[in-house]
Image (cartoon, rainbow, N blue to C red):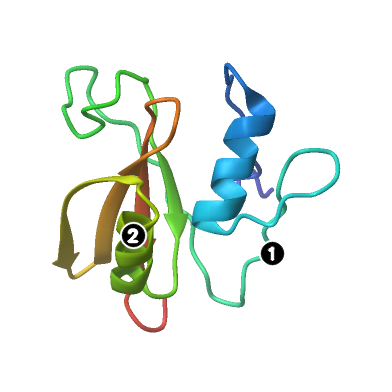
Amino acid sequence: MKRVTGIGGIFFKAADPAALSEWYRVHLGLPMQDWGGAVFVQEEGASTIWSAFPADTDHFAPSSAPYMLNYRVADLAALLDALRSEGCNVVGDMQDSEYGKFGWVIDPEGNKVELWEPPAGR
């Protein structure tokens, strides 16, 4: 019997849901629907990662939220350049590893968002 096969949704509280949704639409290109959320249809072979971190991790810093969202992107370097030019709070340097390229931005409510450009074929 199949059980969990991927991430079905990301749900979180926001002080101003409409403004935060608009920031994600403008700066990260989320395809917002009339009901206020976004729907992603993954291409064939795409993967989604789920991982628990130790309670004392500093990987989510400077955010104090107990979670960090990770979004797949097509061209991380170009997106980070665009976010910087739009005045967004990009933190740290882009990292390149066997798992792909990673970069981070802080959303208007202080949440650290991880941007991931997977390696070719993933």
Residue in the picture at 34% in, 73% down: 78
**Percent of width and height locating residue 111:** 39, 30
Residue furthest right in the image:
34
Residue 101 is left or right of residue 79, and the answer is left
Residue in the picture at 61% in, 77% down: 44
Task: Give the amino acid at mark 1.
Answer: Val
| Residue position for label 1 | 41
Q: Answer yes or no: is residue 77 visible.
A: yes
Q: Earlier in the sequence, mark 1 or mark 2?
A: 1
| Residue position for label 2 | 85
Q: Residue 22 carries which label?
A: none
**Percent of width and height locating residue 27:** 50, 53
Contact, CB < 8 Å: mark 1 with mark 2?
no
Rendering quarter of residue 42: bottom right
Secondary element type, mark 2: helix
Q: Crowdedness of circle 2 by 10 Å Cα count: few (<14), some, many (20+)?
A: few
